[in-house]
Amino acid sequence: MVLFSFKKHIFLVEMVNDNNLKQFNSDEIIMPADAISLIRSSIEDENNDMAFYDNLIRKAPSQKEKMIIHGIRNDEEKHGQILRKIYYDFTKQNISYQTPVNYNFQSSSYRDDLEKALFSELAAVKKYRKILSVMSGDYYTLLMSIMTDENIHAAKYNFLLGNQR
């Protein structure tokens, strides 16, 4: 085990023989600085998801579907707040919410947008899994909560897609 320091935070990293791990998803193994970069991009992703889901709510054909998507959208807002706090704790830099630009919301069907949302949630799970690999304590718990929410969102989008048949 080796202690690794980054921006006044200490990480405990187990040193292992790299050659044994390269055969497995070596892109899953990241350094704390990479995690900070992924957190920053995740903040942007969560902001973009909120705007995308606001549009998806407008397209939803039933009140039930609107409520499901609205709940997901609210989770994304909460995720953004958590990620901004974690980012600040590690970098002492604030990232404020910015409304996404350059979205063409009218370009696809409701079903296509549901599929896009589903795969966006699954991609987020993979990103959070990488970040989790270098986190501990409360940060690990918060990120695990976000990752679990993303899995739940994917299941809900699968449900909504099933209703489109």
Image (cartoon, rainbow, N blue to C red):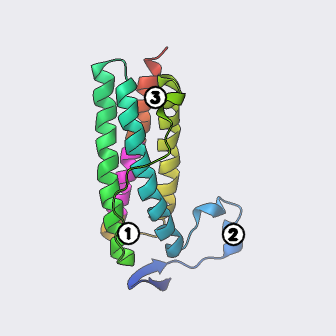
Magenta-colored span = 140-150
Q: Is residue 14 magenta?
A: no
User: Does residue 2 appear left or right of residue 69 in this picture?
Assistant: right
Give the residue drawn at x 33%, y 74%: 89
Give the residue drawn at x 58%, y 61%: 28
In depth, the one of 90 and 138 nearer the eye is 90
Give the quadrant of residue 43. Answer: bottom left
Residue 12 x %, y %: 45, 79
Distance of label 3 from label 1 (alpha carbons): 31 Å
Residue 4 x %, y %: 48, 84
Does 23 appear above or below 31? above
Q: Which mark is residue 157?
A: none
In depth, the one of 133 and 73 nearer the eye is 73
> Which badge, 3 or 1, comes first in the chain's sequence?
1
Give the residue pinned by disc 3. 158
Label 2 SS:
helix
Name the kind of residue labelled 1 in the image.
Tyr
Name the kind of residue labelled 2 in the image.
Asn
Give the residue pinned by disc 2. 20
Q: Is residue 148 magenta?
A: yes
In depth, the one of 164 and 20 nearer the eye is 164
Name the kind of residue labelled 3 in the image.
Asn
Give the quadrant of residue 53. Answer: top left
Label 1 SS:
helix
Give the residue pinned by disc 1. 87
> Which badge, 2 or 1, comes first in the chain's sequence?
2
Give the residue drawn at x 43%, y 49%: 100
